[in-house]
Image: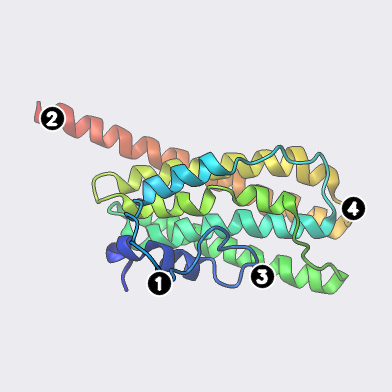
Amino acid sequence: MSFQSAGKHAPVLILALFAGCAGGTAGIEAATPAAGPVEPRLTMREQRQETLTRKEPQPLADAFTDEEVLGILDKSTDRLMAQARIAAEKASNPEVRKLASDLYIEYAAFRERQSMLANRIGLFQEDSKKRENLQIGKELDVIILLEHGPNTFDRAYLAQTISEHQDALDLVDQKILPSIDAPELRALIESDLRDALQKNLARAIDTNRTIRDNVARDARQRS
């Protein structure tokens, strides 16, 4: 199944995108046969609104254990990689496709380095309400991304990517780095992940600006 035709299969696709990540499919349940009359199926936008209305994220705690940090970083990079994997195939602009491809490769490589370090120093990922809180609404944001057509997808992806990177940087600076005990984990996040987030945020902003300027220039030329 191509990403271009994935809209109607979005819940199944999200299961695949987040495969292997604990809690990565929270809120997405398999359909079961109805015993009575079938209720009208909600659109994806209605599902997202219902979810956000039903369950709101709570403020994160001021500190995490190192084990919780591993789980939280997995959640953040899961989303960046899921969005990038879609955009690498679905984006119209070659610069956006290249950005998405580079981001996917970079964060996948970081995950490998994080896993190797955790195994070496004996840290094991820990699930927690803090980690679950980061997930609320986010998987459905990826589904919403799939709804965009060729005329709006690139801008929607860049907007999500910029927002995710800004949120991740704030989380790293304000919550994660002040919490870490293991010096090796701190060094990995400071010199590896944080630098990548900052660099890729600047690149996404620059790409977004270039596309916006090109659209404005083309509009002036047509007028």
Point out the tag, 4 or 2, that comes first from the N-terminus. Answer: 4
As helix, strand or loop, the secondary structure at mark 3 comes to helix
Q: Select label 3 or label 2 by which is in front.
A: 3
* x and y percentages locating residue 84 in the rendered image: 45, 58
Q: Select label 1 or label 4 by which is in front.
A: 1
For residue 181, the mark is: 4
| In the foreground, 221 or 73 | 73
Q: Name the residue under label 3.
A: 112
Q: In which quarter of the image is residue 119?
A: bottom right
As helix, strand or loop, the secondary structure at mark 1 comes to loop
Distance (Cα) linking label 3 and label 2: 48 Å
Figure coloring: rainbow
* x and y percentages locating residue 165 in the rendered image: 57, 44
Q: Are marks 3 and 1 in contact (CB under 8 Å)?
A: no
Point out the tag, 1 or 4, that comes first from the N-terminus. Answer: 1
Q: Residue at x 63, y 45 (%)?
A: 168
| Vertical order, 174 against 196 (above or below) | above
Distance (Cα) linking label 1 and label 4: 49 Å
Distance (Cα) linking label 3 and label 1: 40 Å
